[in-house]
Amino acid sequence: SAFAYRSIDNEAAFYRQVVAGPVPRFLYSPRHERITQFGGTIAKDLGPAVLKSEVIHTRSKAFSVQGVADADGIAKLDLVDYLVGLDFGLDGDTRLNFYFFQRYFTKYKDGVVPDRTENGLTVLLSHKLTSTFEVQALFIKSLNRDDWMFRPRATWNFARNWRLNFGVDVLHGPQLGFFGRFANQDRVYADVRYSF
């Protein structure tokens, strides 16, 4: 499949304004800007596993710049995200997924937090204990730095169209890392969903 769309970016860009005075101050304003994306997906059955891949080209996505040389603290960059992975269906309603992902900036500026090329891995293991109860564990790891997330979760379909999820998010990494910026905000959560 292939797609092209223009949408509001999920991630806010934090524009910076310097307020002059005896002690200059920095004011940051979050903005969710429009981005344009083009991409495609492919899947191929290999027998014991399914090969999956996706690529997305994003134009003019706003990133924060470190340092005060930029007036607004923002750089508009072009990038390509892609992933390649294998999904295995194991015995006893068990699934195991491995994915490698990469982000490459085709237009880059020194001073942005991410490296020009960012690499990572994900592993997802899920198992149906009964027809209504499933457990899973997701691990996402940056290969550029010690930045990761571990998310064990359980899902209970306790009635028709009703689902209860509960789990934990454990986040770790450097202060400017994708997960590390939330390292002091690990969470335990539960939600109830009704589908109609």
Image: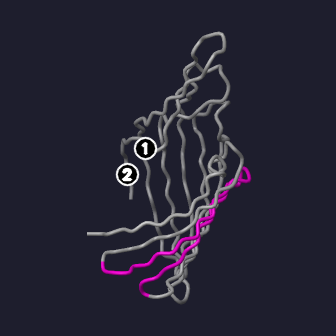
Question: Could you tell me how far apart the alpha carbons at marks 1 and 2 are, in whole angstroms?
Answer: 8 Å
* Residue reaching furthest to the right: 146
Q: Is residue 110 above or below residue 5?
A: above
Residue flagged by tag 2: what amino acid is it? Phe
Q: Is residue 124 above or below residue 13?
A: below
Q: Residue at x 52, y 81 (%)?
A: 47
What is the secondary structure assignment of the residue under circle 2?
strand
Q: Quadrant of the C terminus?
A: bottom left
What is the secondary structure assignment of the residue under circle 1?
strand
| Range covered by the magenta-colored residues | 131-160
Depth check: give the residue in front, 104 or 94.
Answer: 94
Residue 1, image x and y in percent? Answer: 38, 59
Estimate how packed mark 1 is, as few (under 14), some (14 to 19) or many (20 or more) residues with alpha carbons within 10 Å: some
The tally of labels here is 2
Q: Is residue 38 above or below residue 33?
A: below
Q: Which residue is mark 2?
A: 3
Q: Which residue is mark 1?
A: 37
Residue flagged by tag 1: what amino acid is it? Gln
Residue 141, image x and y in percent? Answer: 66, 59
